[in-house]
Amino acid sequence: MGKTSKYVLYVSNLSSATRSADIKKEFSYAGPVEQVERDYKTRSALVELRSERDRAHAVLQSPDAQYAWKKMDGFRLDGRKWMVDWATKDDFKFFGWKWTEDSPSPSR
């Protein structure tokens, strides 16, 4: 298995009716959401969670992302049970995001 993100989660099994705003709203209960990108064709999304404390301690997984992963895996919305996992380099590539986890300051 490849390297996984410390603060970006991959969400699959989304309903075609679920919008990016819906995903952001649900994840925001678990922690601050910086960005959500939805792919309707694959019924999946990337969700970036981060807080100021994560920037200083990027070596460890984000506490907000860790909590969101535990809370949101198996969450039901629009008749679908979400599957949530840590995003990989391949997920970033699919969504056109630049993998920045090895650099000191992430940016897109």
Image (spheres, helix red, strand yellow):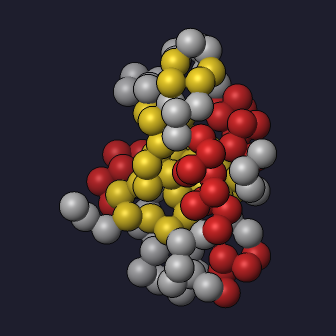
Q: Is residue 78 left or right of residue 16?
A: right
Q: Is residue 101 left or right of residue 78?
A: left
Establish if 51 lies above or below 88.
Answer: below
Q: Assign the N terminus to one quadrant of the image.
A: bottom left
Q: Nearer the viewer, residue 95 or 25?
A: 25
Q: Is residue 2 left or right of residue 78?
A: left
At x 59%, y 24%, the residue is: 76
At x 42%, y 54%, the residue is: 87
The tally of labels here is 0
Q: Is residue 45 visible?
A: no
Q: Is residue 86 left or right of residue 15?
A: left
Q: Assign the C terminus to one quadrant of the image.
A: bottom right
Residue 10 is situated, as x and y percent measured from the top left of the image, at 46, 46
The residue sitting at the left extreme is 1
At x 43%, y 49%, the residue is: 85
Residue 36 is situated, as x and y percent measured from the top left of the image, at 61, 44
Residue 37 is situated, as x and y percent measured from the top left of the image, at 56, 41
At x 69%, y 43%, the residue is: 27
Establish if 6 lies above or below 13.
Answer: below
Residue 4 is situated, as x and y percent measured from the top left of the image, at 37, 64
Q: Is residue 70 visible?
A: yes
Kindly indicate the quadrant of the structure image that contains residue 23.
top right
